[in-house]
Image (cartoon, grey):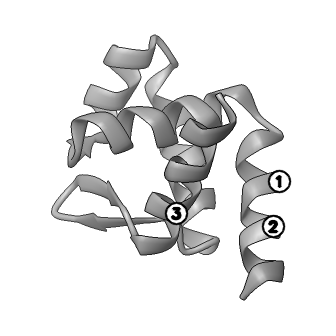
Amino acid sequence: MAEDFDSNMGFIMGNKHRERVVQVLGSKGKLSAEKVAKIEHIPAPSVKKILGDMVEHGLVSENDGVWCLTEAGQEIEREMKKRA
């Protein structure tokens, strides 16, 4: 489990846009990809790609076009706050 956490942490921290997507979902809760893009000023296609990549890592889930952090994603977000 610790290896997964470290791997996921590196995956998120390795890209500023991924960090921002995790932060905005952590602070604002469930959002559409378009809303994330608008809030963070990241192009919507980039946000959709980031969210798709994060699904593969088990960090976000999607339901009817609305995205939220999974438990693993929430753990990453909490650790990011500690390191900030």
Question: Is 69 situated above or below 58?
Answer: above
Residue that appears at 44% across and 60% down: 74
Could you say which is closer to the camera, residue 45 or residue 72?
72
Q: What residue occupies the far front of the structure in this picture?
A: 82
Report the residue marked by disc 1.
10
3D distance between C-alphas at marks 3 and 1? 13 Å
Instruction: Kindly indicate whether the residue at mark 1 contacts the one at mark 2 (C-beta within 8 angstroms).
Output: yes
- What SS does tag 3 mark? helix
* Amino acid bearing label 3: Glu
Q: Position of residue 35 (x, y in %)?
A: 26, 28
Q: Quadrant of the N terminus?
A: bottom right
Report the residue marked by disc 2.
6
Q: Position of residue 23 (x, y in %)?
A: 46, 35
Q: What residue occupies the far left of the structure in this picture?
A: 64
* Amino acid bearing label 2: Asp
- What SS does tag 2 mark? helix
